[in-house]
């Protein structure tokens, strides 16, 4: 085997790490390249959906994720005035998945679990402080140029997975467009040890709270509640994370005497974009490098891990001579339509529903949702969709 006989992966986020572990466990040599000095402690994704947990089970890491997270069999849709509109009980999916619940666990815990395992494997090289800067390829190989602590390096492989996030250097270097939109408002994500469950009756660990003027989302992670909400017109990232604004918004969510203690606060621009192709020759885009969406519904990381396993399965077949190169085109053919027709549409709809201002439309949607949640068959249909199981089945059918 030559040194070029390996798969290069740029980016050790949840997507790059999942692909690396899948490939390495099947005997494929992997080089995982991460720009940061250590695994980023990202306070972004926390929701793992049932089919993603099934995949992490296949990777042999689900028990650790569950151990370090919170199992959530139920999530809620609420309204600031009405309280609980619908309570979704994932146990209706018991015949559809090995994990009929969501798990709330910070994404950095998954990457730490996986990288610890990768670092024990003989066929894996994990490089930190190695930043991919450009790509060249021919009929046989692909070369990733990287800036490392020792200076510039050229890393050679058979294939390259670009899992280097939303601003993917590789996507840009390949001239792949990333069309879509950016919402005018910023989003604030903050977290606190405050016991919101003592102030909101029967609060589930994941709750989307609709309001025409002030919607927000509660998600529980071990030891903390996270709160996600939009900025007001004219607010900047700096003003949104200021003490004054954070306290004012949290008091609006739940008035208390004195100030809230917060653990973190971040302001994000939020986009809805899908790359015009997921493949250019030996280079494949996956995860946020390929698609980004708002976090309402928890589909970014989950969809990215679904990309990682879909692509890796195909790479293994081609690597082992069980399929020809055209098998790899199916990755784009299966995963891109899902991002466009399903993830983009669902997340945009989720946002529109939370911020609906027309009282009649809101009433109609709430009535519909509450009736569905109360009917086991309708609830199952809804949860197959919101848990991304339907999307995975649809992708399979696109083969
Ligand atoms: C507030 C918030 C909440 C969210 N909640 C959820 C949720 O609950 N569920 C969900 O599914 N999604 C959620 N998301 C989305 C989720 O965080 C992303 O979809 C996910 O992180 C994408 O994973 P990734 O591995 O593709 O990219 P990233 O996590 O962005 O990882 C990319 C990695 O590549 C590295 N990198 C970047 N450039 C280079 C380079 N040139 N060379 C080498 N390495 C490089 C980075 O340092 C990073 O480690 C949320 C997002 C936000 C903002």
Image: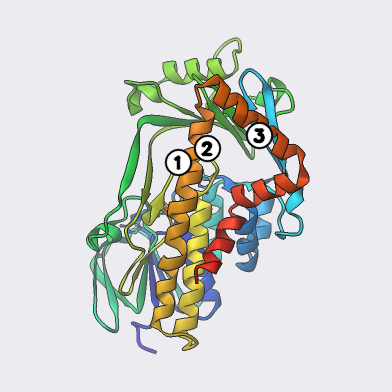
Q: Nearer the viewer, mark 3 or mark 2?
A: 3
Q: What residue is at 59 percent from the left and 63 percent from the top?
A: 393
In the picture shown, does residue 120 fall above or below 219? below
The answer to whether 14 appears left or right of 165 in the picture is right
- Residue for badge 1: 294
Q: What residue is at 29 percent from the left and 59 percent from the top?
A: 171
**Is 388 in front, or is 227?**
388
Q: Picture coordinates of residue 104 (x, y %)?
A: 62, 45
In the picture shown, does residue 25 fall above or below 86? below
Mark 2 surroundings within 10 Å by alpha-carbon count, few (fewer than 14), some (14 through 19), many (20 or more): some
Mark 3 vs ligand 1: CB below 8 Å: no
Residue 44 visible here: no
- Residue for badge 2: 350
| Sooner in the amino-acid sequence: mark 1 or mark 3 | 1
Distance between mark 1 and mark 3 Cα atoms: 23 Å
The answer to whether 59 appears left or right of 314 in the picture is right
Q: Nearer the viewer, mark 1 or mark 3?
A: 3
Q: Picture coordinates of residue 14 (x, y %)?
A: 49, 56
Total marks placed: 3
Mark 1 surroundings within 10 Å by alpha-carbon count, few (fewer than 14), some (14 through 19), many (20 or more): many
Classify mark 3: helix, strand or loop: helix
Find out whether the residues at labels 2 and 1 contact each other: C-beta distance under 8 Å: yes
Q: Picture coordinates of residue 131 (x, y %)?
A: 30, 59
Find out whether the residues at labels 1 and 3 contact each other: C-beta distance under 8 Å: no
Label annotation for residue 368: 3
Mark 2 vs ligand 1: CB below 8 Å: no
| Sooner in the amino-acid sequence: mark 2 or mark 1 | 1
């Amino acid at each position: 085997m030559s040194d070029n006989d390996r798969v290069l992966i740029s980016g050790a986020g949840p997507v790059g790490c999942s692909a690396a572990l899948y490939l390495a466990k099947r005997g494929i040599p992997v080089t995982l390249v991460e720009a940061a000095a250590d695994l980023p402690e990202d306070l972004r994704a926390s929701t793992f959906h049932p089919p993603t947990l099934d995949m992490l089970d296949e990777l042999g890491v689900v028990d650790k994720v569950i151990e370090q997270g919170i199992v959530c069999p139920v999530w809620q849709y609420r309204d600031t005035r009405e309280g609980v509109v619908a309570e979704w009980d994932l146990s209706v999916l018991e015949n559809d998945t090995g994990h009929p619940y969501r798990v709330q666990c910070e994404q950095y815990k998954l990457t730490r679990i996986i990288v610890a395992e990768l670092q024990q494997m003989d066929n894996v090289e994990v490089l930190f402080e190695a930043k991919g800067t450009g790509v060249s390829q021919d009929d046989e190989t692909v070369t990733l140029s990287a800036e490392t602590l020792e200076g510039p390096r050229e890393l050679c492989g058979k294939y390259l997975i670009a899992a280097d996030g939303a601003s993917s250097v590789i996507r840009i270097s390949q001239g792949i467009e990333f069309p879509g939109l950016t919402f005018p408002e910023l989003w604030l994500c903050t977290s606190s040890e405050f016991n919101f469950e003592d102030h909101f009756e029967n609060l589930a660990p994941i709750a989307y709270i609709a309001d025409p003027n002030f919607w927000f989302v509660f998600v529980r992670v071990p030891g903390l509640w996270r709160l996600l909400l939009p900025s007001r017109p004219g607010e900047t990232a700096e003003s949104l994370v200021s003490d004054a604004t954070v306290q004012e918004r949290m008091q609006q969510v739940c008035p208390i005497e004195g100030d809230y203690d917060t653990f973190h606060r971040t302001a994000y621009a939020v986009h809805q974009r899908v790359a015009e192709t997921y493949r250019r020759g030996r280079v494949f885009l996956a995860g946020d490098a390929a698609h980004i969406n708002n976090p309402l519904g928890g589909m970014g990381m989950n969809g990215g891990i679904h990309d990682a396993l879909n692509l890796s399965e195909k790479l293994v077949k081609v690597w082992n001579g069980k399929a020809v190169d055209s098998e790899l085109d199916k990755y784009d053919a299966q995963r891109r339509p899902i991002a466009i027709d399903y993830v983009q549409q669902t997340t945009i709809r989720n946002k529109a529903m939370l911020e609906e201002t027309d009282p009649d439309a809101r009433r109609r949607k709430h009535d519909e949702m509450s009736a569905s949640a109360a009917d086991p068959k309708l609830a199952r249909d809804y949860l197959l969709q919101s848990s991304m199981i339907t999307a995975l089945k649809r992708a399979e059918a696109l083969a």
